[in-house]
Amino acid sequence: MFKKIKADIQSIRERDPAVKSDLEVFFLYPSFKAIRAYRRAHRLYLKKHYFWARWISQRALRKTGIEIHPGATIGKGLFIDHGSGVVIGETAEIGDNCTIYQNVTLGGTGKDTGKRHPTLGNNVMVGAGARVLGPFKVGDNAKIAANAVVLSEVPPNSTAVGVPARVVRRDGMRVEPPSKELDQIHIPDPVSQQMCSMLGMIEDLQHKLDKLIDENNK
């Protein structure tokens, strides 16, 4: 427990240049208070003291604006920057040294049972306002852009952006969208193309015919 608390303080100091001391983190940072309350609640949850576990988590929510279900599994060194509006669901799993910004939801879609919430690997960053919804994996060292809506797996060392989110970088290289040559939906209609060609030929013949008629009349 003490080691995890120390790691949580250290992770905040390393990632927030505004921090001046460990005491500042311990007494003043809402994210640290929320994580510390989660650690207590999680121990009670594992012992099946569900009411008291939720009582602690809801009390922490009222104080910090951060809602972490006591059933979630969180590794060491989690940093929730600012934190207001963060929601972490019951079956969510978070690896070591992850960073989550304000208004992030690690939630479910309402369509799954059992494992309903996402799993974040180690060193994952989730930008402000992002929604990660469903029981899939976000790989180690992945980055999710602000306001992205992630509905499917994100590979390790990748960056996902957009609504719905898609991977735009992987292993430091830009990921190009699928080639148009492989697009089986947005393809030209061959019948329509042939008709357009025939209409062009008819117009050309009509123009030549009108010219011959004019010459004969003269």
Image: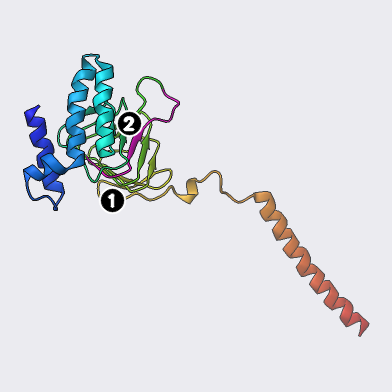
Find the residue positioned furthest to the bottom: 218
Q: Mark 2 — residue?
A: 118
Magenta residue span: 99-112
Q: Nearer the viewer, residue 163 or 19?
A: 19
The disc at residue 173 is 1
Q: What residue lies at 13% left-to-right and 53% top-to-bottom?
A: 17
Residue visible at 14% across and 53% down?
18
Residue 142 is situated, as x and y percent measured from the top left of the image, at 26, 42
> Residue 45, located in which quarter of the rendered image?
top left
Measuring 28% from the left and 50% from the top, which residue is drawn there?
173
Where, by quadrant of the figure, is residue 134 drawn?
top left
Foreground label between 2 and 1:
2
**Residue 1 position within the rendered picture, expressed as x and y whole percent measured from the top left:** 10, 26
Q: Does dot 1 land on a helix, a strand or a loop?
A: strand
| Quarter of the picture holding the C terminus | bottom right
Q: Which amino acid does label 1 sit on?
A: Met
